Amino acid sequence: MKKIILQILFIFFIFPAFSETKIKALSEGNIDAKIEIIVFESLTCVHCANFHEEIYPQLKKNFIDKGIAKIEFRNFPLDLAALNASKISHCKNDGKPEILHFLYKNQKRWAKGSTVEEFNKNLKEVLNSQKFGIDFDKCLNNKKIEDFVLEDRINGVKKFNVNATPTIIINNKKFDKTLNYKNLKKTIEKLI
């Protein structure tokens, strides 16, 4: 009898904890770094793509890879196409921004069309050119990931008054200077 009760307890109390996987934020760097950079961004935002192409590589090389700073990419979708792309970027749920970086690098290939169906078709084609090992339709229809993405957006507005993308937060303070590497570098160096 004890064995049956233990099995029931395992099924109802322990097993659900494993099946209820928490969605992981996309981040890079030393989790114990003194400097935390948060980027609120929308995958259809051209300025966000420029950040990933021109500014982020220098941040990564000079601060993130050296363990000085960590960076977290938060979702702030400005339209339905960006929402869907954000869901796809979280699909692997490994916390790595590999798909996110790929989508920004290839933004001009997929972020076009006059309907969300066209955007989704382009997005799927671009992703199929790589082997990310995700089920596109399953990711797109994942309510848990969608809630996570939308919660990021809500928290951005509530906590940091985010109203545009990209918005940079450094150690819980909104970066309010012109967004370029030189200004970010100066701000980060003052915190070291």
Image (cartoon, rainbow, N blue to C red):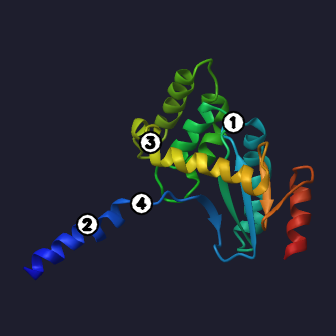
Q: What residue is at 11 percent from the left and 82 percent from the top?
A: 2
4 or 1: tag closer to the N-terminus: 4
Q: Which of marks 1 and 3 is nearer the N terminus?
A: 1
Q: Where is residue 123 in the image (x, y as percent from the top left)?
A: 54, 32
- Cα–Cα gap, marks 2 and 4: 16 Å
N-terminal-most mark, 2 or 1 = 2
Instruction: Give whichever of 37, 66 is nearer the camera.
Output: 37
Front position among marks 1 and 3: 1
Give the mark nearer the N terminus: 4 vs 3: 4
At a point 78% along the width and 59% down the height, the residue shown is 169
Image location of residue 150, percent across then percent down:
59, 45
For mark 2, what is the residue?
Answer: 12
Classify residue 2 as left or right of residue 10: left
Disc with the residue nearer the chain's start (3 vs 2): 2
Type of amino acid under label 3: Cys
Residue, disc 3: 139
The 10 Å Cα crowd at callout 1, few under 14, some 14 to 19, many 20 or more, is some
Looking at the picture, which amino acid does disc 2 mark? Phe
Q: Is mark 1 on a helix, strand or loop?
A: loop
Numbered disc 4: secondary structure: loop
Residue identifier under label 4: 21
Q: Quadrant of the N terminus?
A: bottom left
Residue farthest to the top, as pictured? 114
Q: Earlier in the sequence, mark 2 or mark 4?
A: 2
Q: Quickly name the residue at label 1.
A: 78
Spatial distance from mark 1 to mark 3, Cα to Cα?
19 Å
Residue 10 drawn at (x, y percent): 23, 72
Outermost left residue: 1
Q: Residue at x 79, y 42 (%)?
A: 164
